[in-house]
Image (cartoon, rainbow, N blue to C red):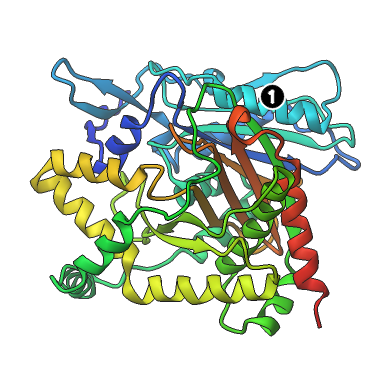
């Protein structure tokens, strides 16, 4: 039987190359997805061989997980299939000392953020940890950001990790493309010369206040995880601010957390400029599109004392950014410059990521509409940890799944210190918004 010919090499997109440029001795460039499976009831605990079998079968639907980087002598980088791919190199058992406490789980994951993925192999691993103290099973998936942004990682989880019924549900709700004529019309609209100046003024503006998270980042990381049910929270927020979206609510919770954290350190800033990633994926895009997102900036009103007013102001500002189509215009500009003037693209990347441009990156990725299961075990929580960059000491990543928001916080401990006040503030903000009448 003849072997299938190897797939052709795939060029890295401008976004992938930009992500690789952010790596340094102190920034690793990967993300973590932490799935907590419910304790087994009347069935064996998921084991490593069953997990390897599940992932190996799923990779047939997600061949990008076999891709590795190949660097040519002239510096050109491309994706190629790994001819020596071995599932055992990527799906591993990581025994601890029996059960794992919540503190130990955070410590293990913090060390995994500090470690580097093996560049000679595809840039991902999944580790099966020992059970938690309550019997739950943690799976920790580390994947390089150049392989997958937040939405692509959720697609990959659907293909290789979730049980078949949950995977089918995810495929059925994927977004559809607008079609060639619609794409052309949108492309011409967002490239209209009159739109760019205002977007650039907003994008390149400097914050009036120094970021409390600005500092020199080392290789150390500290993490925090928390979950907020929004079954009652979302209707309460809608009664207060009818036009508020779920993403507005996430930003309001983060604003409350930052306010509590800043007060614990002696004072809060008037406002905090945050960067909001916006997914531009669509169903009909080319399969190599690992990263397809843009962003806009929003000022969080930290000094505003009333949580409802904070939510109202955030909602008003995000609505303005969406109407102006800031994310799409920035994306078009960066793509055009990557094609026409790569040095200008690199300069813009630096300007848009400088600490004066924003203090904090807050992402919110939509997961399945109901909690999935893996290897027959219900998933009770699914967190994302995204790495900080060189001069931003804190990053917040949120996954909204079923009726819960799962917050993952990653920080430079010498800049941010304890994350506990920030988590307490997020929880308190949710309680305040829910408790209002």
Q: Is residue 320 above or below residue 13?
A: below
Which residue is the extreme one toward the left? 340
Tell me if 339 is positioned left or right of 415 in this view.
Answer: left
Name the residue beneath numbered marker 1. 108
> In this view of the protein, which residue sits in the foreground, 139 or 315?
315
In this view, the residue in front, 344 or 19, is: 344
Q: Nearer the viewer, residue 107 or 201?
A: 201
Is residue 381 among the parts visible in the rendering? no
In the picture, the quarter occupied by the C terminus is: bottom right
Tell me where residue 239 sits by quadrant.
Answer: bottom right
Vertical side of 191 occupied by 354: above or below: above
Residue appearing at x 43%, y 37% in the figure: 145
Image coordinates of residue 64 in percent, x first then y, are: 39, 37
The residue lying furthest to the front in this view is 266
Q: Nearer the viewer, residue 92 or 315?
A: 315
In percent of width and height, residue 396 lies at: 58, 47
Instruction: Give the SS element for disc 1.
Output: helix
**Residue at position x 68%, y 75% from top?**
308
User: In this rendering, is residue 38 above or below 282?
Assistant: above
Q: Quadrant of residue 15?
A: top left
- Where in the figure is residue 81, as x and y percent of width and height? 32, 27
Left or right of 220? Residue 63 is left
Q: Is residue 92 left or right of residue 437?
A: left
Quarter occupied by the N terminus: top left
Say few, some or many: other residues with alpha carbon within 10 Å of mark 1 (under 14 / 14 to 19 / 20 or more): some
């Amino acid at each position: 039987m003849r072997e299938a010919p190897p797939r052709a090499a795939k060029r890295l997109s401008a976004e992938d190359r930009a992500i690789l440029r952010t790596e340094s001795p102190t920034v690793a460039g990967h993300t973590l997805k932490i799935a907590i499976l419910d304790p087994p009831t009347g069935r064996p605990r998921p084991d490593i061989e069953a997990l390897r079998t599940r992932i190996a079968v799923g990779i047939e639907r997600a061949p990008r997980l076999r891709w590795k980087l190949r660097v040519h002598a002239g510096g050109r980088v491309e994706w190629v299939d790994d001819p020596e791919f071995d599932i055992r190199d990527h799906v591993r058992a990581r025994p601890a000392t029996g059960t794992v406490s919540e503190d130990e789980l955070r410590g293990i994951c913090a060390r995994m953020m500090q470690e580097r993925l093996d560049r000679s192999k595809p840039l991902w691993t999944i580790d099966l940890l020992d059970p938690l103290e309550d019997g739950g099973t943690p799976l920790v998936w580390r994947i390089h950001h150049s392989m997958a942004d937040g939405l692509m990682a959720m697609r990959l989880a659907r293909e290789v990790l979730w049980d078949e019924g949950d995977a089918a549900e995810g495929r059925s709700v994927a977004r559809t493309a607008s079609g060639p004529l619609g794409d052309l019309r949108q492309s011409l609209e967002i490239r209209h010369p009159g739109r760019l100046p205002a977007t650039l003024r907003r994008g390149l503006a400097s914050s009036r206040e120094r970021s409390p998270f600005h500092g020199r980042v080392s290789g150390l990381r500290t993490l925090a995880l928390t979950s907020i049910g929004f079954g009652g929270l979302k209707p309460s927020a809608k009664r207060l601010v009818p036009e508020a979206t779920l993403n507005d609510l996430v930003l309001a919770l983060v604003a409350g957390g930052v306010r509590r954290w800043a007060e614990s350190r002696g004072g809060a800033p008037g406002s905090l400029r945050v960067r909001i990633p916006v997914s531009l994926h669509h169903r009909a895009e080319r399969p190599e599109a690992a990263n397809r997102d843009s962003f806009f900036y929003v000022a969080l009103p930290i000094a505003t004392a009333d949580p409802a007013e904070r939510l109202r102001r955030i909602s008003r500002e995000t609505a303005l950014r969406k109407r102006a189509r800031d994310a799409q215009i920035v994306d078009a500009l960066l793509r055009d410059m990557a094609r026409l003037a790569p040095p200008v693209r690199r300069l813009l990347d630096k300007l848009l990521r400088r600490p004066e441009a924003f203090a904090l990156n807050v992402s919110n990725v939509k997961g399945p509409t109901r909690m999935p299961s893996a290897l027959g075990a219900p998933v009770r929580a699914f967190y994302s940890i995204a790495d900080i960059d060189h001069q931003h000491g804190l990053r917040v990543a949120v996954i909204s799944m079923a009726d819960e928001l799962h917050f993952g916080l990653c920080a430079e401990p010498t800049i941010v210190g304890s994350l506990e006040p920030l988590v307490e503030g997020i929880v308190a903000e949710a309680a305040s918004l829910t408790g209002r009448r």
